[in-house]
Amino acid sequence: AQSVSQHNHHVILSEAASLELGCNYSYGGTVNLFWYVQYPGQHLQLLLKYFSGDPLVKGIKGFEAEFIKSKFSFNLRKPSVQWSDTAEYFCAVNAYPNTGNQFYFGTGTSLTVIP
Amino acid sequence: DSGVTQTPKHLITATGQRVTLRCSPRSGDLSVYWYQQSLDQGLQFLIQYYNGEERAKGNILERFSAQQFPDLHSELNLSSLELGDSALYFCASSVITASEQYFGPGTRLTVT
């Protein structure tokens, strides 16, 4: 079965600290990869996406992620977090087309940034 | 604002009842997805429709059904409700299948 693993369930950082959230997936074929963010009380918003090309993708608000195919990973990074980055972060994988266009989400990582 | 709307925002109902959740996709989006988000299960994909046709099925119970209408809005029907069905139900839409999805604000369902 396809799965997406986010190893960090809850991360607490001080402002200006660097962030790296892990994401690993189990599907071995062609994948589209996404990171979504859910701020408190809001809906999920797309942070960044990878379909093909340069494995280092840049998203909004200074976030970036690196696709490492050999490690089945798509880790999210930010060099210096802000209090406003406090949110839930979800990694998602679309194993297209073999799994019928299904999207698999990780269980999420809750990030708390302390001012 | 993602452009995806969902109604109602909150719904409280009793076990055994049936409810209908409604979703209107972003203008121009043909694909609609439904997800269930609960504390212990995370975000679970339920079902996808593309231009009125079912395209993919995830962990959707037989008590649940959905459809997408000619105007592209979608409804998720939940019947014989159980306490464990209490969750946030999100709808998302995309231009084409496999592209990024835009999420609505969700409907919080509480079954008592």
Image: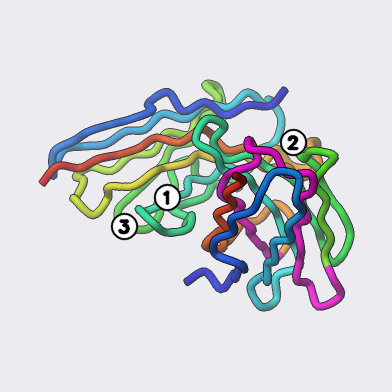
Marks 2 and 1 sit apart, C-alpha to C-alpha, by 23 Å
Q: Which residue is mark 1?
A: A37
Give the letter of the chain under mark 1. A
Circles 1 and 3: CB atoms closer than 8 Å? no
| Amino acid carrying mark 2 in the image | Asn
Above-or-below relation of B34 to B84: below
| Amino acid carrying mark 3 in the image | Lys
x and y, in percent, of residue B46 in the image: 72, 44
Q: Secondary structure at mark 2?
A: loop
Q: Which residue is mark 2?
A: B59
Circles 2 and 1: CB atoms closer than 8 Å? no
Left or right? Give the position of A13 relative to B101: left
Above-or-below relation of A57 to A45: above
Q: Residue at x 54, y 61 (%)?
A: B10
Give the letter of the chain under mark 3. A
Marks 1 and 3 sit apart, C-alpha to C-alpha, by 11 Å
Which of labels 1 and 3 is toward the front?
A: 1
Q: Which mark is residue A61?
A: 3
| Amino acid carrying mark 1 in the image | Val
Above-or-below relation of B34 to A68: below
x and y, in percent, of residue A108 in the image: 45, 36
Q: Residues within 10 Å of mark 2 (few under 14, many from 20)?
A: few
x and y, in percent, of residue A53 in the image: 56, 46
Query: Which circle's residue, 1 or 3, is located before the other in the chain?
Result: 1
Q: Secondary structure at mark 3?
A: helix
Which image quarter holds the N terminus of chain A?
A: top right
Q: What range is drawn magenta here?
A: B69-95
Q: Residue at x 52, y 69 (%)?
A: B2
Left or right? Give the position of B59 relative to B105: right
x and y, in percent, of residue B69 in the image: 84, 71
Q: For this rendering, which residue is in front, A56 or A48?
A: A48
Q: Secondary structure at mark 1?
A: strand
